[in-house]
Image (tube, helix red, strand yellow):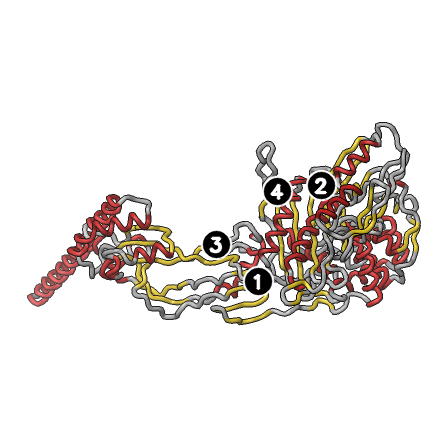
């Protein structure tokens, strides 16, 4: 009994001790959580460390001529840790004034007094993460590192510099959509398509967490050194890019268009030398000011639209290659109007009586819708699948595969009966409707014709480099070795030349008449489909290559939805093509044969508009330029050769509408207004088309419209 009582007392004693210990521990926990919370939190943060990823420097994007298109600029966040163990506070007090003065001079956002207060408050409150500057530049960081107190180093001063990279485009909006945007999500352009090469490899470093959840490197050493990204050398030539963008912008503003794109490609390699994409700003311009245009979307690869007449090259190529059609075959286009299943199709000159009987080559030259549709119907009417198969062999049913994010797929029927196929589809497709292509996909076909029938994949990158050393070079990539037979290819090349022949009847007859080189190409004027069908809006285009005899460059211009009343491809898109081609021809030495630094062969004389004989003769004499001609007539047509300009008489019949095509506006107005006509003009430059045919009978107070380009 005594032992049991003794045991019970001891048990209660042990129990009491455990209870007391428990209360003691619980009390200590409460004390730490309340009174000593901040102290122990700070201690924990001091010793919490982790291996963290360190992003490398992103590679730069260059133009082919060495201009920097996109670069990563280092930006530094400057903070101060007042709890750094090695700080000597006597030194801090002695150098505080000079430190504050230096911070104010370099950063410039606060006075020396304000910086002094920031540093004192950080010390008094024991802050480990006082923000000094959020975005200090590389030069500012170098100057800050040399200031009194800071120059003692990270641990003796407590100052840290956290480096980040910001992407900059030195040329601003120029080629902005092609270069792209570097961001964590939804990258675009080259930044997206070449992100793997540009990104480099991530490094590893031990860092510790400080107050505020920020991380600071424990030392400057890395566990794994970050590897900078490769530099991408693009094919873009910024000189030509600037010309293309400016020419496009001027034409868009002149005609108040919705958007436009220009692509210039090297024929032999498929390298893109310029790609401009401009879209009208949604903000209304001030009164009297033109609309603003920006690189907000890459229409060249992302906008698949009905190409219109530029697709006739593929249609007639298919007819000649697979439909037993020859360039000299004839089609009766009648008065320029025909009907397919009750739907009217017409030519642009239907109101003038049409073109009558045309050869296949002439159908393409004058861009006859009726002639093209009848040709395809006659060739493939009994085998419509044969037309689609022929288009597949040409390559227009496939995307180009250009390495640039965002290329839209072309929509070209692969099988009869697909989608919305109907009895009209064959003839509508033949003239570029019920099909969609991006401008780059259209240009790829024209480039193949220029390249001897070999279709190349368009490319935007020439090579990759690492610190100036070439890592990889990109060679031309063949999509199709041959898009058609050599016989058909020669016929297509000839037809493209006829379109721009100054002495022919092509739709681009006058655009390049004064140029010192020949162009092969095709105009396009396509109606724009809206929610309620085709509602009177148009999309103008011109695709081709130059020089026609020995092609070096191919180019396409597309301008959509003009508000000026002018919409033909020859008047809207053609002049942009010409301005870019002129600049290329003038600045590329390979176009000109030289010897000992001088021209061994004379270039062609500068061209001149047709016009008044007296004025032209005085001009040639003043410039000491050779010319032939001169007659009793007042008006002449100018033909510019390699070494001499020939002035041929142009007869103006009385009581007939004068022929003013090829003249400047001043001479044209003089002739027409003296004839009693009321003149309305569209565009600027040389008269390309007049609404009343030359030689027509004059009618009192008759109105005539001139289209200039």
- Image side of residue 382 versus residue 211, left or right: right
350 and 419: which is toward the camera = 350
Name the disc covering residue 92, or none.
none
The residue to which callout 2 is attached is 684
Closer mark to the observer between disc 2 and disc 4:
2
In space, the residues marked 1 and 4 are separated at their CA atoms by 29 Å
In space, the residues marked 2 and 4 are separated at their CA atoms by 22 Å
Closer mark to the observer between disc 3 and disc 1:
1
Q: Quadrant of the C terminus?
A: top right
**Residue 366 appears in the picture as rendered:** no
Give the mark, 3 or 2, whose residue is nearer the N terminus.
3
Q: For the point 60% across and 69% down, which residue is it?
A: 474
In space, the residues marked 1 and 2 are separated at their CA atoms by 34 Å
Tell me where residue 497 appears, x and y as whole percent. Answer: 80, 57
Closer mark to the observer between disc 1 and disc 4:
1
Label 4, residues with CA under 10 Å away: few <14, some 14-19, many ≥20: many
In space, the residues marked 3 and 2 are separated at their CA atoms by 38 Å
Labelled pair 3, 1 in contact (Cβ < 8 Å): no
In space, the residues marked 3 and 4 are separated at their CA atoms by 24 Å
The residue to which callout 4 is attached is 280
Tell me where residue 483 appears, x and y as whole percent. Answer: 77, 65
The residue to which callout 3 is attached is 168
Give the mark, 3 or 4, whose residue is nearer the N terminus.
3
Label 3, residues with CA under 10 Å away: few <14, some 14-19, many ≥20: some
Residue with the most extreme left position? 2
- Image side of residue 354 versus residue 507, left or right: right
Under circle 3, the secondary element is strand
The residue to which callout 1 is attached is 64
**Residue 486 appears in the picture as rendered:** yes
Q: Quadrant of residue 610?
A: top right
């Amino acid at each position: 009994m005594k032992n049991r009582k003794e045991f019970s007392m001891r048990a209660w004693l042990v129990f009491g001790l455990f209870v007391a210990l428990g209360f003691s521990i619980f009390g200590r926990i409460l004390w730490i959580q309340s009174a000593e919370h901040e102290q122990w939190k700070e201690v924990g943060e001091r010793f919490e460390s982790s291996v963290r990823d360190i992003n490398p420097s992103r590679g730069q994007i260059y133009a082919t001529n060495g201009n920097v298109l996109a670069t990563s600029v280092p930006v530094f966040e400057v903070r101060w840790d007042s709890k750094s163990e090695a700080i000597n506070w006597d030194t801090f007090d002695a150098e505080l004034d000079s430190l504050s003065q230096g911070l104010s001079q370099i950063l410039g956002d606060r006075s020396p007094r304000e910086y002094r207060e920031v540093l004192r408050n950080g010390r008094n409150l024991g802050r480990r993460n006082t923000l000094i500057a959020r975005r200090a530049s590389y030069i500012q960081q170098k100057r800050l590192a040399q200031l009194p107190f800071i120059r003692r180093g990270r641990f003796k001063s407590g100052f840290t510099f956290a480096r980040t990279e910001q992407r900059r485009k030195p040329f601003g909006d120029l080629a902005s959509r092609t270069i792209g945007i570097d961001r964590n999500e939804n990258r675009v352009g080259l930044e997206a398509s070449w992100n793997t090469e540009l990104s480099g490899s991530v490094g590893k470093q031990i860092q510790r967490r400080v107050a505020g959840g920020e991380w600071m490197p424990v030392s400057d050493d890395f566990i794994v050194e970050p590897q900078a990204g490769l530099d991408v050398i693009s094919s873009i030539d910024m000189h030509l890019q600037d010309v293309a963008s400016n020419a496009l912008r001027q034409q868009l503003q002149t005609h108040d268009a919705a958007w436009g794109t220009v692509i210039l490609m090297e024929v032999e390699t498929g390298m893109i030398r310029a790609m401009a994409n401009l879209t009208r700003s949604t903000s209304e311009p001030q009164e009297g000011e033109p609309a603003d245009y920006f690189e907000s979307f890459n229409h060249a690869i992302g906008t698949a639209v009905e190409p219109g007449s530029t697709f006739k090259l593929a249609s007639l190529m298919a007819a000649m290659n697979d439909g037993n059609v020859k360039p000299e075959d004839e089609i009766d286009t009648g008065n320029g109007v025909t009907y397919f299943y009750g739907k009217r199709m017409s030519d642009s000159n239907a109101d003038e009586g049409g073109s009558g009987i045309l050869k296949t080559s002439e159908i393409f030259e004058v861009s006859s819708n009726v002639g093209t549709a009848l040709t395809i119907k006659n060739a493939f009417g009994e085998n419509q699948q044969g037309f689609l198969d022929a288009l597949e062999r040409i390559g227009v049913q496939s995307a180009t595969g250009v390495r640039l994010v965002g290329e839209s797929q072309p929509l070209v029927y692969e099988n009869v009966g697909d989608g919305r196929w109907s009895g009209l589809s064959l003839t509508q497709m033949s003239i570029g409707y019920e099909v969609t292509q991006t401008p780059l996909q259209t240009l790829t076909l024209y480039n193949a014709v220029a390249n001897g029938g070999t279709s190349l994949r368009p490319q935007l990158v020439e090579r990759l480099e690492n610190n100036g050393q070439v890592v990889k070079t990109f060679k031309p990539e063949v999509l199709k070795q041959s898009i058609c037979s050599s016989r058909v290819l020669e016929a297509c090349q000839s037809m493209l030349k006829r379109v721009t022949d100054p002495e022919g009847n092509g739709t681009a007859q006058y655009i390049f008449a004064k140029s010192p080189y020949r162009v092969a190409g095709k105009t396009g004027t396509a109606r724009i489909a809206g929610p309620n069908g085709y509602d009177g809006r148009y999309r103008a285009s011109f695709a081709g290559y130059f020089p026609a005899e020995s092609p070096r460059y191919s180019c396409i211009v597309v301008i959509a939805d003009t508000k000026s009343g002018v919409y033909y491809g020859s008047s809207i898109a053609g002049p942009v093509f010409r301005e870019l081609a002129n600049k290329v021809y003038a600045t590329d030495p390979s176009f000109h044969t030289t010897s000992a630094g001088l021209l061994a062969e004379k270039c062609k004389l500068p061209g001149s508009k047709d016009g008044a004989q007296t004025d032209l003769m005085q001009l040639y004499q003043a410039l000491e330029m050779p010319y032939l001609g001169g007659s009793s007539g007042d008006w002449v047509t100018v033909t510019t050769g390699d070494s001499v300009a020939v002035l041929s008489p142009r007869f103006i019949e009385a009581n007939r509408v004068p022929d003013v095509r090829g003249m400047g506006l001043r001479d044209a107005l003089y002739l027409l207004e003296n004839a009693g006509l009321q003149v309305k003009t569209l565009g600027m430059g040389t008269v390309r088309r007049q609404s009343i045919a030359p030689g027509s009978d004059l009618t009192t107070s008759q109105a005539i419209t001139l289209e200039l380009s």
